[in-house]
Structures are given as structure tokens and as C-alpha cells.
């Protein structure tokens, strides 16, 4: 029974879109649907092998918007898209999250804000689906890949870019399973988030 549970947990880990996934993770920003959206995602490389092509790729919002025509951008500003809550948001959440709502991809919190998770965010009209296809095509054309090695520290402005994990040739399966990146998600200021902090823990979000 216990072995089954462990196998089940491992299978979920391999298939999930969480940081612990062994397979590619599609383009997204971290916790885009969460009530406290991080401004920074900081990653420290702890264990990684040069034998394995596991890239963290980035596209700046600015570059992405330069690539998309006005018609596509207008479509992306409409609230005709849906994204289910992501794995990390759902995992052991301390609060009842309910159902994710319809939202625009572009221009939520700021004019250049992009709320999008590749293969999860979907358009609910043919035009919206077409805009998503243009967006995905531009992301993969523009992406810049980083091979994070032990000791590398990478700070990414979560709301100013999208990132993914690309997996290429793997020559050392064992090293892939032992790959370890330490990651924190942070906000610039606690000022707007007091309602969501754990009582007595003034810097920790509840959920
Ligand atoms: Fe991420």
C-alpha cells in the first residue's frame, strides 16, 4: 500500500508542471492566478550535469509585445481566456480557492502584464484561440535559453517575462533525477499583502 502511494506520488511528480517535474514545463509566469503574485522568482543551481540539456528559457514581455500585431494584442486584452489554477497554487492551499475566472491575457495588473500558461490557458472563442496560437509561436521564436549550473543564481522579474523549461538530449538519467534547483518566490513590498500573511509570521503568505 505504501509502495503504491510512493509510486503514485512519483508518477505525479514526473507528469506535473511543478518545479519538480522531470519533463518540459511549458511557458508561464509563476503563480499567475494566485492572490499574491510574486514579483521575483530567484533560482539557485545546486545540482546539475552538463551532460543533460535542461534549459530554463525566458522571453521578456517587451520583446513579445513587439512581435505581436495590434489585432492580436486587442484580442489578448479581452476577458475571453481561462486558466485553471496551477499545481503550486492548488498544492496544500490553506484557503478555499474555488473556480478560476475568465481573464484577459494582456493588460491585467499593468498594461504589459501577461497572464498566460502555455497549454493551460485557453481561448473560449475561435478568435481567442487564434491569438493564443500567435502568442505561442512568438514565444518559441524569441526564447533565450539558460543552462543553470551549480552555483548560478538567476533572478527573474516574474511579471515582466515568461519562462519555461526545455529538455533536450539527456545523457545522464541519474543526474537528471538528482538535478536540484532551489527556488524562492518573492514580492517587492509586503504593503499590499497584509491580509494574506500568516498571523505572527509577518513575511510568510498563507496559501
Ligand atoms: Fe516557473
Image: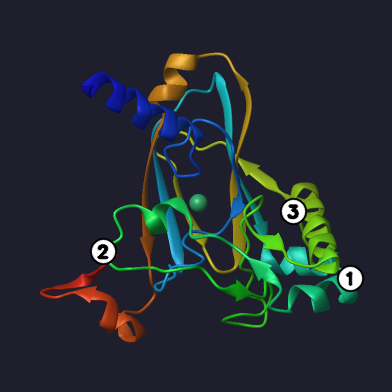
Quadrant in which residue 205 is drawn: bottom left
Residue beneath disc 1: 69
Q: Which residue is mark 2?
A: 94
Name the residue furthest left.
Answer: 200
Q: Mark 3 sits on what residue? A: 139
In terms of sequence position, does the residue under pointer 3 or pointer 2 come before the other? 2
Decide if residue 84 is on the left or right side of residue 4.
right
Quadrant holding the C terminus: bottom left
Tell me how far mark 3 sits from mark 2, CA to CA: 33 Å
Rate crowding at label 2 as few (under 14), some (14 to 19) or many (20 or more) other CA atoms within 10 Å: few
The disc, 1 or 3, on the residue closer to the chain's N-terminal end is: 1
Residue occupying the point 63% across, 62% down = 116
| Viewer-side residue, 180 vs 84 | 84
Query: Which mark lies nearer to you, 3 or 2?
Result: 2
Q: Compared with residue 123, is residue 107 higher up or lower down, i.e. above or below?
A: below
Quarter in which the N terminus is drawn? top left
Alpha carbon of mark 1 to alpha carbon of mark 3: how far?
14 Å
Amino acid at each position: 500500500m505504501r509502495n503504491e502511494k510512493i509510486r503514485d506520488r512519483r508518477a505525479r511528480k514526473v507528469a506535473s508542471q511543478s518545479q519538480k517535474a522531470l519533463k518540459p514545463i511549458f511557458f508561464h509566469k509563476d503563480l499567475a492566478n494566485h492572490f499574491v503574485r510574486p514579483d521575483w522568482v530567484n533560482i539557485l543551481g545546486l545540482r546539475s550535469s552538463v551532460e543533460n540539456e535542461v534549459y530554463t528559457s525566458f522571453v521578456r514581455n517587451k520583446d513579445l509585445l513587439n512581435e505581436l500585431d495590434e489585432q492580436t494584442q486587442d484580442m489578448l486584452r479581452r476577458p475571453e481566456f481561462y486558466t485553471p489554477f496551477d499545481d503550486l497554487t492548488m498544492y496544500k492551499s490553506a484557503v478555499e480557492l474555488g473556480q478560476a475566472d475568465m481573464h484577459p491575457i494582456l493588460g491585467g495588473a499593468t498594461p504589459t502584464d501577461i497572464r498566460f500558461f502555455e497549454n493551460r490557458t485557453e481561448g473560449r472563442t475561435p478568435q481567442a484561440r487564434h491569438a493564443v496560437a500567435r502568442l505561442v509561436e512568438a514565444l518559441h521564436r524569441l526564447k533565450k535559453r539558460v543552462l543553470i549550473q551549480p552555483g548560478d543564481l538567476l533572478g527573474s522579474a516574474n511579471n515582466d517575462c515568461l519562462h519555461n523549461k526545455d529538455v533536450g538530449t539527456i545523457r545522464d538519467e541519474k543526474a537528471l533525477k538528482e538535478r536540484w534547483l532551489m527556488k524562492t518566490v518573492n514580492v517587492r513590498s509586503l504593503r499590499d499583502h497584509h491580509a494574506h500573511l500568516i498571523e505572527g509570521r509577518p513575511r510568510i503568505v498563507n496559501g
